[in-house]
Image (cartoon, rainbow, N blue to C red):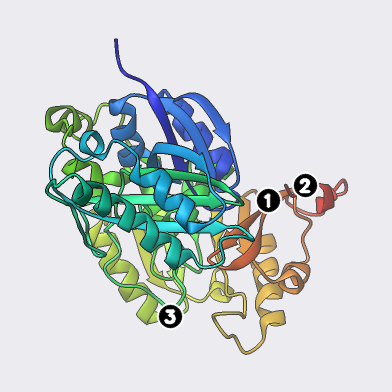
Amino acid sequence: MKQSFEMAAKTLYGLEEILAEELINLGADEVRIGRRIVTFEGDKRLMYKANYCCRTAIRILKPIVRFRANNPDEVYEQIKQLDWERLLPTPKTFAIDAVVYSETFTHSKFVTYRAKDAIVDHFSGKNLPRPFIRVNNPDIPMHLHISHNECTLAFDSSGKSLHKRGYRIEETEAPLNEALAAGMILQTGWRGESHFVDPMCGSGTLLIEAALIAMNIAPGIFHDKYAFEKWDDFDAELFEEITTDDSQEKNFNYKCFGSDISPKAIAVARKNVKNAGLSNHIELKVLPFQEMRENPGKGILITNPPYDERLKVNDLTNLYAMIGERLKHVFSGYEAWIISSNPEGFDKIGLKPSSGMKLNNGALPCEYRQYILFAGKRKDCVNPSHLYR
């Protein structure tokens, strides 16, 4: 019988339901949605697959213990008494990352220090070889989450954040998080059944994630190493079986088209696309959105225009008005999705959104809006005010 255990997948705000669907499709049980996290149950195979296949996960955690504590000393005592000889049977380096949402725990770094001391002191107190703390690239990264007085200590099976795919060798000024880009695409329901267009593509993240989704290529194909590969119970044969199975991959009979006003951005995108091995599926060109005169045929448009918070534009009003005008006149018949933190900009698009959702792009609260681009005028428009969750 396969051993099942609890896990937790961290994600970005707004992507929780999309991640839950990904996990269910991988075979996860007892899936529960929280805020920026999805808990689930499964075996070692599922843990490996969740790391390798989930597009919207940031990291996959394996909880060790849950307890209540009212101060750092109580955290120390609870962690020190754990059976660390079983949890860390061979001497390894470790690190603890603490996230604290609490009125009583005001210094997360001090909590982290006490948690680390607890593990080291456990071994020292029994005259056993002690593990050593290493901040960068430890053998065993751990995650301590404190909400009020509820504490959870977990092994981090991922190590490096899963959004750092590895294909992006250069970036423009404000690149999209890869997990956010994938979540934006998955939210639309598009899976490669038509062309994909991004007329403000920057470093090409949306295009690359779209091509990977269209061909159902796992994002982990670019990842160099996971933390679980250093665990004592790592099953190399099982992991190789997962990473060499391409039976779920499929043909992409359309293309991803990207353009940008910046020659530098397109040069960066070309390098990233080539590094991802997707040059045959993604076409790039230097072309200002306002100069677009035709679309490539049946497709969807998803883009991340400047918001005026991180990327300055001379006339934001004219920019968003131009986006609306090009959508209406060049992309009639398309479904278009736009993310922005600028409500005034959205107003200037001049089109009624059909649906939308709230997302965060970094620290910026954003709206992600869908526009169904009918030919002519749309008489019965949906009021978007009730559509954001």
| Residue appearing at x 52%, y 53% in the figure | 12
Residue found at the far top of this picture: 1
- Give the side of residue 247 with respect to residue 314, left or right: left
Q: Earlier in the sequence, mark 3 or mark 2?
A: 3
Find residue 30 and report its horizontal and vertical position in percent. 51, 23
Residue that badge 3 annotates = 262
Q: Residue at x 55, y 64 (%)?
A: 361
Dot 2 lies on which element? loop
Residue 216 is at least partly visible in this image: no
- Residue 387: assigned label: 2
Q: Position of residue 257 (x, y in %)?
A: 42, 58
Q: Amino acid at mark 2?
A: Leu
Specify which label sits upstream in the sequence, 2 or 1. Answer: 1
Q: Is residue 2 above or below residue 338?
A: above
* Camera-nearest label, 3 or 2: 2
Q: Secondary structure at mark 1?
A: strand
The x, y position of residue 372, in whole percent, is 70, 49
Viewer-proximal residue among 161 and 80: 80
Q: For the point 57% across and 31% down, which residue is it?
A: 32
Asked whether disc 2 touches disc 1, contact meaning CB atoms under 8 Å apart, the reply is yes
The residues tagged by marks 2 and 1 sit, at their Cα atoms, a distance apart of 7 Å
Q: Which residue is mark 1?
A: 357
